[in-house]
Amino acid sequence: MPSESSPRVLLFGAGSVGAVYLWLLSRVASTTAVCRSNYEVVKKDGFIINSKTFGQGIRCKPEVVRNCEEAVSRSSDPYDYIIICSKAIPGLVPKLIAPAVTPGHTAIVLIQNGIGIEDEYAQAYPSNPVISTVVYLPVTQRPAGVIYHGEAEKLQIGAYPSSAPSQHAQAFTELIRSAGGCAEFYDDVQLKRWFKLLVNASWNPICALSLSKDTDVLAASGEAKDVLLAVMLEIRDIAAAYGYTITREEADLQLGRALARIPKNAGIEPSMLQDVQAGRRIEVEAIVGNPIRMGKEKGVACARLEMLYVLAKALDQHIGSG
């Protein structure tokens, strides 16, 4: 278990979400960040966080490294937590964090979108606790090192699998709370993952493929509302096949939130759209591919999701070859 005084935290992937949690955790823990594309800027100037929740002009200058090998070389003390805030690209991160994982000690925390993303960590590190989270944090990083954060901040946290001992997930929940963040512990956080996927698997690929904010998609055609809802209901049906209930009313509510923003000209840029605009690979497998495969295993029809997957996969390949 992490020490109660000052746990050691390594954050992998200091993008917009990672920067906010890096700053929060720096209040209560010893923190180091693995930065990649923004390394030079953050090393020199740190982050500037402009947040409607926490305040404007917050400066955070963390200890930064280029990789986990460098992080480990700084100290022989083990890390209590490795927090993964990078994109959920299959097969990549578990290998990259290996130098910083102490068997039987380091808890691996996934602050990432998607469904079915935990298995590769559990298989790679069978003696380490895996903590799965669902994050609600409207945030962007433009330019590098400058963070803009809206009014919501919440982590929904649970052990993976749900049958695993929960003390590490509970301890991490308390750590986030002690830092001033909003954290909720769940005995089975997978329902919360499916619920967020309801929004992510519909809005993310459609906005990325159309290069449009969510409100712009809805305003562009009369058919958009029904198409978005149909995609959400496919996710609902796949979740139900795995024992997780999401009601039609909840899907209607999520769509209604976007519709309500149209008159306010307050559209949202989902993460996939931000990635495409920046020329970055997108989380197509975690957000669209995995639920399709899981649906097929249970015989659930998901034709609209399949179409979005084919198109988003081609877009991702195009970005990757550029």
Image: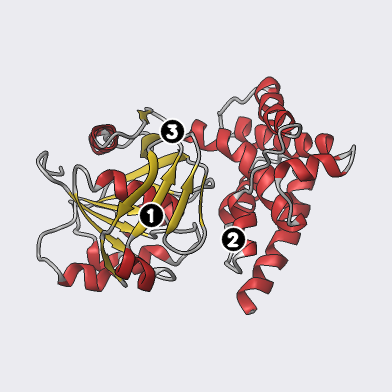
> Which residue corresponds to the image point at 28% horizontal and 32% vertical from the top-left?
177
Q: For mark 3, give the secondary structure.
A: loop
Question: Looking at the picture, which amino acid does disc 1 mark?
Answer: Ile
Q: Measured from the top left, where is residue 204 in percent x and y?
A: 65, 49
Do the CB atoms of the residues marked 2 and 1 lie less than 8 Å apart?
no
Q: Is residue 152 visible?
A: yes
Q: Which mark is residue 189?
A: 3
Do the CB atoms of the residues marked 1 and 3 lie less than 8 Å apart?
no
**Which of label 3 and label 2 is nearer to you?**
2
> Which residue corresponds to the image point at 18% horizontal and 56% vertical from the top-left?
79
Q: For mark 2, give the secondary structure.
A: helix
Q: Estimate how packed mark 2 is, as few (under 14), some (14 to 19) or many (20 or more) residues with alpha carbons within 10 Å.
A: some
Q: Quadrant of the C terminus?
A: bottom right
Q: Nearer the viewer, residue 181 or 187?
A: 181
Q: Which mark is residue 197?
A: none
Where is mark 1, residue-wise? 48
**Which of label 2 and label 1 is nearer to you?**
1
Relative to 226, residue 81 above or below = below
**Which of label 1 and label 3 is nearer to you?**
1
Where is mark 2, residue-wise? 275
Q: Earlier in the sequence, mark 3 or mark 2?
A: 3
Question: Looking at the picture, which amino acid does disc 2 mark?
Answer: Asp
Q: CA distance from mark 2 to mark 1?
A: 20 Å
Q: For mark 1, give the secondary structure.
A: strand
Q: Is residue 109 visible?
A: no
Q: CA distance from mark 1 to mark 3?
A: 32 Å
